[in-house]
Amino acid sequence: MAAMSLDSVIRSGGHLVLVGDPKQLPPTVISRRAAGQGLCLSIVDRLHQALGEHQSAVMQLRLCYRMHPLLLDWPNWVFYNNTMQTGLADPLTQRPLVKGLPWQEFQPWSNVRLEELA
């Protein structure tokens, strides 16, 4: 279905912008037959593979506004080869704690060595 939609865009000479992250959750495919036919690849992964020599058409967004910098550290190290940066100038004021929740002192990964997780 997705391939048919893309085909009509390509044939019409139109432009297409897809936004997605192949490092995020992949499709959940239980059927081995379906997985064998390529349905375990996301549309973003399929297009990226199909680009061949035109890989420069794919751009990674590297500025993250959604996540506190301390929470970004681990996925940045494990999945993104330390290419991500925070867009938050002051995380404490731009991502304040939610009032009414019993927050403890924030110590991410305090008992875990990052090297052991990769």
Image (spheres, helix red, strand yellow):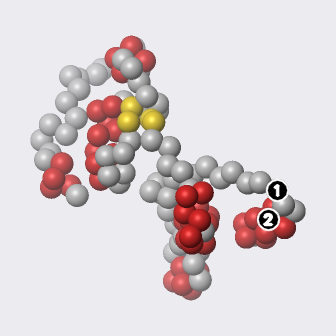
- In the foreground, 80 or 98: 80
Helix, strand or loop at disc 2? helix
Residue in the image at 15% along x and 55% along y: 116
Question: In screen coordinates, is 105 left or right of 85?
Answer: left
User: Which one is in front, 86 or 117?
Assistant: 86
Q: Which is more toward the observer, 27 or 10?
A: 10
Query: Would you call the spot at circle 1 few (<14 residues within 10 Å), some (14-19), or many (20 or more)?
Result: few
Q: Is residue 74 left or right of residue 115?
A: right
Q: Amino acid at mark 2?
A: Ile
Q: Is residue 11 left or right of residue 23?
A: right
Q: Are marks 2 and 1 in contact (CB under 8 Å)?
A: yes
Image point (46%, 54%), residue name: 24
Q: Is residue 18 above or below residue 11?
A: above
Reading the image, the residue beneath label 2 is 10
Taking the spot 32% from the left edge, 52% from the top edge, the residue there is 81
Q: Quadrant of residue 106?
A: top left
Using residue 25 as the reference point, say whether residue 68 is left or right of it.
left
Residue 35 screen position, x and y as percent? 54, 79
Rendered position, 24 above or below 98: below
Q: Is residue 8 visible?
A: no
Q: Which mark is residue 14?
A: 1
Q: In this view of the protein, can residue 64 be seen by the observer?
A: yes
Q: Tag 1, which secondary structure?
A: loop
Counting other residues with Cα less than 10 Å from the Cα at mark 2, is it few (<14), some (14-19), or many (20 or more)? Answer: few
Where does the image place residue 40, in percent across and percent down from the top left? 53, 72
- Quarter of the figure with the C terminus: bottom left
The quarter holding residue 92 reads top left
Mark 2–mark 1 distance (CA, rounded to whole Å): 6 Å
Task: Give amino acid for label 1.
Answer: Gly
